[in-house]
Amino acid sequence: MNGTKTPSSLVNGQRPRTPNNERDFSCCRIVVLGSSGVGKTALTVRYITRRFIGEYCPTLESIHKLQTVVDNEDTRLEILDTAGQMMDSGCVWKDYYAFWGDCYIYVYSINDRQSFDQIVNFKKQLESVRKQTLCGILVGNKSDLLHDRQVLETDATELADEIGCKSYEVSAADWTQVDRIVDLFSDAVREYRKLRTSRDIRARRMSSSRFRQAIQKVITGRGSVSKKTTTSNSWQMS
Ligand SMILES: Nc1nc2c(ncn2[C@@H]2O[C@H](COP(=O)(O)OP(=O)(O)OP(=O)(O)O)[C@@H](O)[C@H]2O)c(=O)[nH]1
């Protein structure tokens, strides 16, 4: 596993570029966030190594880089496992995370109501920084602790509908749930691809409608058009 504890890499964390210096959209950046102790590291480690870490050691930020395949498409994943303590303290985390991430995995613990109630705030704060809707997945972790449950599955489904996310309830501690954990990370990549595609389509529509408007202005003579030479085809828009 390739983990680097470098918050500064977020500040300088420009999106990777291809050799042609274009933005590399085969790379997907996932930010795993939620309150302290909900199991963000346990989920991330379970996904990457298939192992469970039982001990608790509060995380500073760690970025894990790996290559994977989702729906037959190669994907470079960068997973940012955030520090819950920083989020609970309301530090400046949100600006970094908002600009760094492509998709967000919002983790709460089913036996910690407060961690669940925080999710809406986290999402709102990120979107207010980015000024656009961000895609994400809602994850209730520690589903093995049913006897301690403070968050009903129906509450989670309602919240997921409200914030436009898919929702999962899992246990990083339960090895039989590895496939579900892999699924939820794959869904994060799918959500990112979906959003990217719809933005591409919108951008293309916008640019073709601007092009049509410009042509229309030329035809109707409403645009600022100057005739450059005597040749009929040589119009120049200014
Ligand atoms: N029972 C149970 N314990 C879990 C589960 N996931 C994580 N834990 C335990 O919960 C504790 C906290 O887990 P972490 O993964 O370190 O939590 P975190 O959200 O990364 O915490 P921060 O680093 O403070 O942000 C550890 O002792 C884990 O072993 C789970 O699914 N079930």
Image (cartoon, helix red, strand yellow):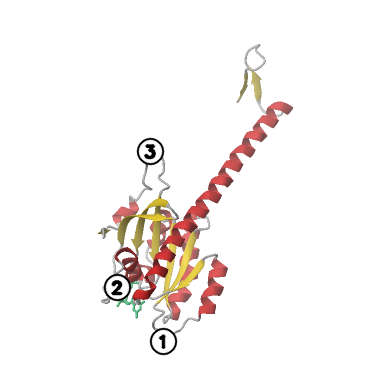
Q: Is 1 on the left-hand or right-hand side of 119?
A: left
Let me know if residue 68 appears in the view: yes
Q: Amino acid at mark 2?
A: Phe
Q: Residue at x 50, y 64 (%)?
A: 124
Residue nearest the viewer, comparing 37 with 174? 174
Q: Amino acid at mark 3?
A: Asn
3 or 1: tag closer to the N-terminus:
3
SS state under label 3: loop
Q: Amino acid at mark 1?
A: Asp
From mark 2 to mark 1, how far is it between C-alphas?
Answer: 21 Å
Query: Which image quadrant for residue 58?
Result: bottom left
Q: Residue at x 44, y 67 (%)?
A: 106
Single out the residue that lies furthest toward the bottom.
Answer: 147
Residue 46 at x, y = what percent?
A: 33, 68
User: What residue did someone put label 2 on?
Assistant: 52
User: What residue did someone put label 1 on?
Assistant: 148
Single out the residue that lies furthest toward the top.
Answer: 230
Q: Quadrant of ligand 1?
A: bottom left
Q: Mark 2 or mark 1: which is in front? A: 2
Let me know if residue 37 appears in the view: no
Q: Is residue 226 above or below residue 53?
A: above
Residue 144 at x, y = what percent?
A: 39, 81
Q: Residue at x 31, y 59 (%)?
A: 63
SS state under label 1: helix
